[in-house]
Every structure is written in C-alpha cells, then in structure tokens.
C-alpha cells in the first residue's frame, strides 16, 4: 500500500523559511514533487524532481524554493525561502510510480503572513 506522509507546514512571516518533507512508502517513484492549491484557485505544480536528480520549478518559485530527494529514504523535501503571502496554500506531495500510477499526500497548510 502506497503512503505519502507530509510534514513541515505552518505559519510564517513574509521573508521567512519553511521546509516540507514527504516520506513515501510502498513503491519506487520515478518522479516526486510538490503541488499547491490556494483558496479559489486550481492546484498547480510547484516543483518536481526525477530519480536521477533533475528538477523542474514553477517560475513563481525559482530562486526561492529548492526541491531535493533522498532515494534511500524515499523522501522528497521542499526548502522554501523568502516566502511571500502569495505562497499561502495547501501543499500536496505527489509521486509517480514506475508503473505509471500517481499518488497524493493528504496536504499540509502553509500560511505566510504579511
């Protein structure tokens, strides 16, 4: 059974930092990443990373967020620096298995106050 367990969300002032973690189990994942959904908006990709280490970022977070993964621990991280109020959203871990299935975490709230 595949499980994605997220942690690290919370409330932070603008300019601050947070680190999200997503521990996955039950499969090996080719691509792992983070999406976010703000109230009234569609879920959007924040960042993703492939098994080999390549990364992809939304333009809005480039230079501020860093995604990384520990394949041995099946864990993906999102280091978020210079946070802005517009980064406020529920952040979801996403993982794609080698067999092509997509899994989601339960979501973790990130709130950035101005």
Image (spheres, rainbow, N blue to C red):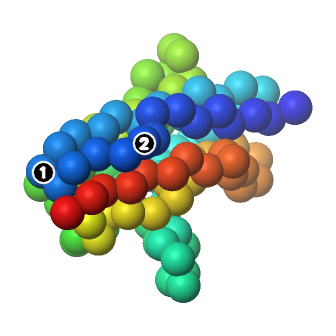
> Is the residue under label 2 in contact with that under label 1 (CB below 8 Å)?
no
The reply to whether residue 52 is visible in this rendering is no
Residue visible at 32% across and 63% down in the picture: 87
Residue visible at 36% across and 40% down in the picture: 78
Query: Mark on residue 10?
Result: 2
Residue visible at 45% across and 63% down in the picture: 89
> Which quarter of the picture shows residue 97?
top right
| Residue extending furthest toward the right | 1
Q: Position of residue 42 (x, y in %)?
A: 54, 81
Quadrant into which the N terminus falls: top right
Q: Which element is circle 2 on?
A: strand
Disc 2 packing (10 Å; few <14; some 14–19; many ≥20):
some
Residue visible at 37% across and 46% down in the picture: 11
- Residue 110 left/right relative to 19: right
- Residue 52 left/right relative to 83: right
Disc 1 packing (10 Å; few <14; some 14–19; many ≥20):
some
| Residue extending furthest toward the front | 114
Query: Mark on residue 15?
Result: 1
Residue 71 vertical position relative to residue 4 in the rendered view, above or below: above
Query: Disc 1 to disc 2, how far (Cα)?
Result: 14 Å
Query: Mark on residue 110?
Result: none
Q: Position of residue 55 (x, y in %)?
A: 32, 49
Q: Position of residue 77 (x, y in %)?
A: 40, 34
| Residue extending furthest toward the bottom | 40
Q: Nearer the viewer, residue 105 or 57?
A: 105
> Which quarter of the picture shows residue 60?
bottom left
Closer to the chain start, of discs 1 and 2, is 2
Q: Position of residue 27 (x, y in %)?
A: 74, 31
Q: Nearer the viewer, residue 113 or 21?
A: 113
């Amino acid at each position: 059974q595949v499980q994605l367990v997220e942690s690290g969300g919370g409330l932070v002032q603008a300019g601050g930092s947070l680190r999200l973690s997503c521990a996955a189990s039950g499969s090996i994942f080719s691509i792992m990443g983070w999406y976010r959904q703000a109230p009234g908006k569609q879920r959007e990709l924040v960042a993703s990373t492939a098994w080999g280490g390549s990364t992809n970022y939304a333009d809005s977070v480039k230079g501020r967020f860093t995604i990384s993964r520990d394949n041995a621990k099946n864990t993906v991280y999102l280091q978020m620096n210079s946070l802005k109020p517009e980064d406020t959203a529920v952040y979801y871990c996403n993982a794609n298995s080698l067999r092509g299935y997509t899994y989601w975490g339960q979501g973790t709230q990130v709130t950035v106050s101005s």
